[in-house]
Image (tube, helix red, strand yellow):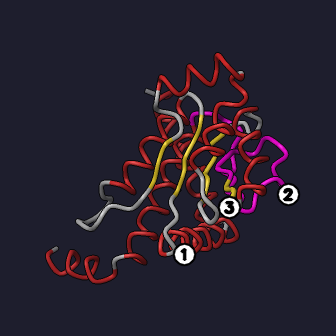
Amino acid sequence: MTRLQAGLVESMAVKQAMLDDRPLLQTLLQLADRIVRSLREGGRVLWAGNGGSAADAQHLAAEFVSRFAFDRPGLPALSLATDTSMLTAIGNDYGYEQLFRRQLQAQARPGDVFVGITTSGRSPNVLAAFDACPALGVHAVALCGLGGELEGRVQTLLRVPSRHTARIQEAHITLGHLLCAEVELRMFPEQAAAAAERH
């Protein structure tokens, strides 16, 4: 029981640190504005990550396309970590480090937003994708923990205040859900108001 309680205490401590981190929350709000601007101009949000972060990329893309808190039109988003034929072809032909960069080169349009999820801040294929963003006109976002040297490599940096992989992953989903909620509210205020009235 003590180990379980310790894990919950650790998780809550990371969330409390994020709650107290006003620059992090302000950056999240600014990112919501940036994504809304992209979507209104015909852009979309592209997500990528490895392992558990690949699952998070798929999860958060689905929240945009399907729905988050209320019924509304789908928002264009895509996970670059889900197509096994694509992943194995690129990995085989070009190497695993090119996995997301190659897809960005094929799929991204100027004005799109790319969110690379890397708990360590050092995933080579996510870093390669970040490096491709400037030439593609894509806004690069890093969702990471305390590791890695990402300052100056991306335009938006969301650092979870932890070095523990599980705690970072838990916080990434929390930040992703907060981002989904903010974008949804800004894109569809009338539907949000109607949903609030029903509850």
In this rendering, is residue 163 above or below 114? Answer: above
Q: Which element type, helix, strand or loop, lies under badge 1?
A: helix
Q: Position of residue 134 (x, y in %)?
A: 77, 57
Q: Which residue is mark 1?
A: 37
Mark 1 burial class by Cα count in 10 Å: few <14, some 14-19, many 20+: some
| The label number, if any, that marks residue 139 in the structure image | 3
Depth order, front residue of 46/86: 86
| Count of marks placed on residues | 3
Question: Does the stretch in magenta take in 146?
Answer: yes
Residue 117 is left or right of residue 121, and the answer is left
Q: What's the magenta region?
A: 142-166
Q: Amino acid at mark 2?
A: Gly
Callout 3 environment at 10 Å: few (<14), some (14 to 19), or many (20+)?
many
Mark 3 residue element: strand
Q: Which residue is mark 2?
A: 152
Q: At x 47% / y 35%, what residue is drawn?
A: 55
Residue 84 percent location from the top left of the image: 47, 24
Residue at image coords 49%, 41%: 56
Do the residues under discs 3 and 1 have CB atoms within 8 angstroms? no
